[in-house]
Image (cartoon, rainbow, N blue to C red):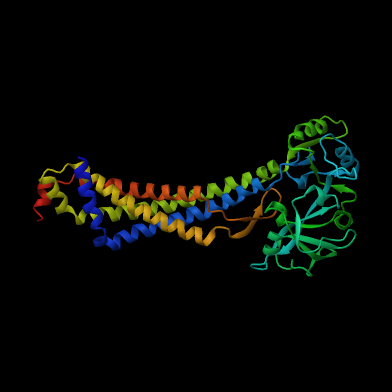
Amino acid sequence: MLGQILAVTAMNVRTIPQRLGSSAVAICGIVGVVIVFVAVLSIAEGLRGLEAAGDPDIALVLRAGSDTEMTSGFYMEHVNAIAEAPGVARDNNGEALASPELLVIINVPLRRNGIEAQAPLRGVLPVAFKVHHRLSIVAGRTFTPGRNEVIVGRAAQRQYAGLDIGSTIRSGQNTWRVVGIFQDHESVAEGEIWCDARVAQPVYNRNNSYQSVSVALTSRDRFDTLKDALTTDPRLTVMVMRQSDYYAEQSRDLQHMVRGIGFVITGLMALGAIFAAVNTMYSAVAARTSEIATLRAIGFDSLPVVVSVLVEALLLGAVGAVIGGAIAWAALDGFQTSTLNFQMFSQVSFRFAVTPRLLGQALLCGVAMSLLGGALPALRAARLPVIEALREL
């Protein structure tokens, strides 16, 4: 039986060039589905990469019950109480590394089309640069406290127009001058604009309030100590999480939405690709009717015929999946873009991530579509009446 399967399958594969037109249709259908599959899910993979962008050595303190920084709020007396908690790191001068931060949303035009989008403007104090120790200036300089100056993340500078060094940003009645570009290990912060919090507070009518406090931990395993101290402090009503966990939670809903849309679109396109594969394999069976009948007449079983048809379908699917995956990888991997974060109503920058795992899923998707498309023609080939087929010789 194995010898029959190998013989029939090899003969079938060698005749594929004779059906190049119909085979190309099936391959193109699978290529299109795989490109869409990889393109959409690479967005989700890119957003998932934001989870790893947070610093686990930094704790984020928000008001209890807040979904995001935008719905949180603290006054300076609360910040001082947080800075006194055990587990908060201190610098060489004994200053607590607790950074109160203000977050507002401003309108800035996108670089690619000039349409205004919402960008996060974060007000910080000088201690923020000690807490966010991975952040570094890559061009220009940091802003001078007390001045209407801002620094922008690399992702924000690429996504928004007018954020080059020396440019100005008009927001409400205030004008900010861009003086530097910073990086932060491709974290969410690279999609933000930073300024002096004490300058931003009166501009945006925030008095002496902040929305979150970022805390540098003395060590990673001191997080629970800090959390217990803050959540049991009668002066505070707060929730405490690692910065990395906060970013993961913020991107999770968006990931689920993108994946859901991607599977729906891919499923609809896959139906068309399966029909194309069915037609291709039916054509292959029809072209080999006499050949199949002859094999059956001289003693070949129906199983080798079925396997040969399925192998041909599998090969076409694999070729289409590899071509589609290669095109998607070459065109999209690492491509920087942004989308709306529905929880904060601001743009979040990310990179398309065409990962090996995603390419493997695309290959399985292409193979599965081709096998589904080849199943019915394979059964037809197995049930082909031998006598009727021989009459056509």
Judged left or right of residue 280, residue 236 is: right
| The residue positioned farthest toward the front in the image shown | 92
Splitting the image into 4 quarters, where does residue 301 fall?
Answer: top left
Give coordinates of residue 186: x percent, y percent.
67, 54
Give coordinates of residue 7: x percent, y percent.
20, 48
Query: Residue visible at 49% across and 53% down?
Result: 38
Query: Which quadrant of the figure contains the C terminus?
Result: bottom left
Name the one closer to the observer, 37 or 222.
222
Give the total number of marks visible in the rendering. 0
Query: Residue visible at 80% across and 36% down?
Result: 238
Query: Which quadrant of the figure contains the N terminus?
Result: top left
Name the one closer to the observer, 277 or 85.
85
Give coordinates of residue 255: x percent, y percent.
59, 47
Query: Residue visible at 66% across and 42% down?
Result: 249
Judged left or right of residue 35, residue 176 is: right
Name the one closer to the observer, 202 or 349.
349
> Up-down: is 309 above or below 173?
above
Name the one closer to the observer, 345 or 339.
339
> Up-down: is 12 above or below 244?
below
Query: Residue visible at 69% across and 43% down?
Result: 244
Judged left or right of residue 288, residue 119 is: right
Give coordinates of residue 72: x percent, y percent.
79, 43
